[in-house]
Amino acid sequence: MSRPDSLSPLFRSLHSIKGVGDKLAALLTKFFGAPDGQEAIALDILMHMPSGVVDRRRQVGIVDAGLNQIVTLLLHIDRHQPPPRGKPHVPHRVYAHDETGEMQLVFFRAQGGWVEKALPVGEERYVSGTIGFFNGEKQITHPDYIVEPEKFATLPLVEPVYPLTQGLSSKALAKLVRQVIESVPAIPEWIDGATLDQRKWPSFVDAMRMVHLPDAPGEAELWSPARQRLAYDEYFVGQLTLQLIRSTMVADRGISREFTGEVTDRVSALLPFALTDGQKTAINEIRADLASPDRMSRLLQGDVGAGKTVVALMAMAAMVESGAQSAMMAPTELLAAQHFKTLKPLCDAAGLGCELLTGKMKAAERRAKLVGIADGQTNIVVGTHALFQSGVEFHNLGLTVVDEQHRFGVHQRLALSGKGKHTDLLVMTATPIPRTLVLTHFGDMEVSILREKPKGRQPIDTAVLSIGEYDRVIARLQARLHEGAQAFWVCPLVEESEHLDVVAAEDRFAELQKVFGDQVALVHGRMSATAKQEVMARFAANELKLLVATTVIEVGVDVPNASIMIIEHAERFGLAQLHQLRGRVGRGSARSSCLLLFKGNLSETAQARLDTIKSTEDGFVIAERDLELRGQGDVLGTRQSGMPGYRLAVPDVHRHLLDFAHDDAKALLSRNPSLTGPDGEAARTALYLFRKDLAIPLIRAG
């Protein structure tokens, strides 16, 4: 089905709206961030929410108008006092009165006689603005509105305030909003009547009217019924989209796998430690998914060091029993090599073919590996996303395991699952994601969580110190390295920047070299991958004692002997980053410590972050706290990676609506999977309105 014609007024280009020329249209297109090459449309204006409301309903006499109040007064204009010639900095003053008193209206640099025209002597005008005092007299400087008595209705007594951009005035935007609201068509209702009554919510169109043209300030507040309704709609459509993706990925395209248990038994007998209860549960959940005829689409969440790779290995071993191959994908070559290093010895011992495939390989070596993958000799292939480029043919790919999923969004998940016709998908992330974000970004996936750390992992002592204690830190570090420990020293940025008085990694490295000589080395993002790997290998082999690094070491570096983590300018890092960095130590048998060095006076947020890290090692507690401290855009790293940015919902205020939206979307699709009939049509309309038409082709026919 194509977009319903009734919605056309909202999808027309801004040019068709009165008063919009090329310049304004281009400005709005840029401001609303319309997709490449597309113009902004009327719908963009409708979805642009006010950030607050100005209340001009206070209509009093001059005598009752108080300092800094916004008032609307009916004034009689007495006389004008323009600035003397040649003194443009003196303001133009207009003297006026009502029955209760006198006041002035003040205009700076008012040229061209427009003030005289707007406020003719001897006539009455409604004037709205903020009351000030000057030399004991009340005045309004640059009133917001001046209106003739017969046109009083055009003065907005309750006026929404919008986020603006250079060159766009609030009056111009308000005019556009009014025109768009007038053209909103009747829209079918996608929330059932009982729910609307129970929550006392208006219809979609009424909600938009209340938010953009409120009669009272309360109608447009974030927690008003109108804003709650619109936030719910946005969440609902997002959840519906994810559920449709899920039904496409999962629908009857899977294969029921059968397992003998012999390979998994061999592998688990080889593991150097017992599986935790969390690992056992996750493995059982995954096996149940693989055995069912639906395709698996599961997110495996586990904190740094919770043993996700082993769970993935058990899943891949099970696939071997059912006669299929597995591919494990990591975001970087460094991480792919690391996974391979973990898996290879266990696979060799269990008699499984395991190969690493990277972009840097020599052609002959690569060809040999491709043969093994194509004829099925290789059971498990590890690599970067290069695994899914053309030229790599699998004998029978059954399972794709993806590490660090938050780096690719929903579209990539769909593309990935196309390579193996019926492949199951397991996604692993070390970023503990709070439940609200799991729903918004991974609502199309089932979730397994590993909460405990593997046995033998040491707790990490965390301390917070001022950089003023530098000498003490160095002395302590010398003693510890002398005893055989290894340490990371993390700096925030590579190059000097005027704006941030950051000690660049290179400077800190030079300082530390004076003390530690050739026992210290530097890695940063500007180095070539080979140079980085070379330094990391020397550190892992214990040839280096101290590694100075920018955050390139954040994800997946595994050096069990390293037991000290020093983070300089810790106040500049986010909570998730601090937690990830700290997780690089505490991987061996030695008691580990993490030192957070800060500089200067800490802001409240920075203080709260450092306190959180100091008080807990539970990644899920940290992630929830992170969400509170900085809102949702950033918890998953990048804003731009196809993450749903919300325009109507404000997560801090509307988060509770997400659960409703999730349940309602799920219920609708299980009741009406092809979205037919009136409620199906209404839901489709909602998908178009919120521009999720990507999901429309995924709706199952009949």
Image (tube, helix red, strand yellow):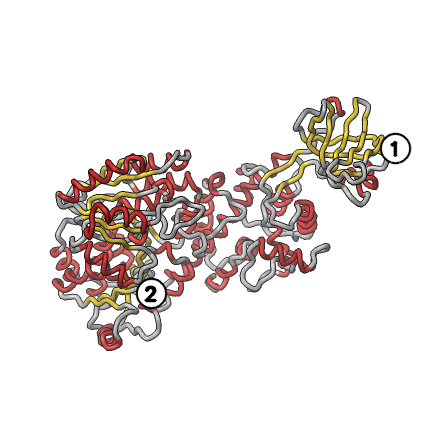
* Mark 1, secondary structure of its residue: loop
- Neighbor class of circle 2 (other Cα within 10 Å; few <14, some 14-19, many 20+) is some
For image coordinates 60% across by 49% down, the residue present is 165
Can residue 276 be seen at all in this image of the molecule?
no
Q: Nearer the viewer, mark 2 or mark 1?
A: 1
For image coordinates 65% across by 28% down, the residue present is 68
Q: Position of residue 449 (x, y in %)?
A: 29, 47
Decide if residue 129 is on the left or right side of residue 465. right
Decide if residue 345 is on the left or right side of residue 40. left
Q: Are marks 2 and 1 in contact (CB under 8 Å)?
A: no
* Mark 2, secondary structure of its residue: helix
Compared to 288, does 150 lie above or below? above
Count of picture labels: 2
Nearer-the-camera pick, 697 or 522 = 522
Nearer-the-camera pick, 72 or 27 = 27
For image coordinates 58% across by 56% down, the residue present is 30
Nearer-the-camera pick, 490 or 384 = 490
Task: Say which residue label 2 marks.
Answer: 385
Task: Say which residue label 1 marks.
Answer: 122
Q: Position of residue 73 (x, y in %)?
A: 76, 30
Please state which amino acid type lies under the numbered disc 2.
His
- Neighbor class of circle 1 (other Cα within 10 Å; few <14, some 14-19, many 20+) is few
Q: Position of residue 262 (x, y in %)?
A: 14, 61
Decide if residue 456 is on the left or right side of residue 203. left
The label number, if any, that marks residue 468 in the structure image: none
Can residue 266 be seen at all in this image of the molecule?
yes
**Residue extending furthest toward the right:** 122
Q: Position of residue 58 (x, y in %)?
A: 70, 29
Quadrant of the image containing the N terminus: bottom right
Please state which amino acid type lies under the numbered disc 1.
Gly
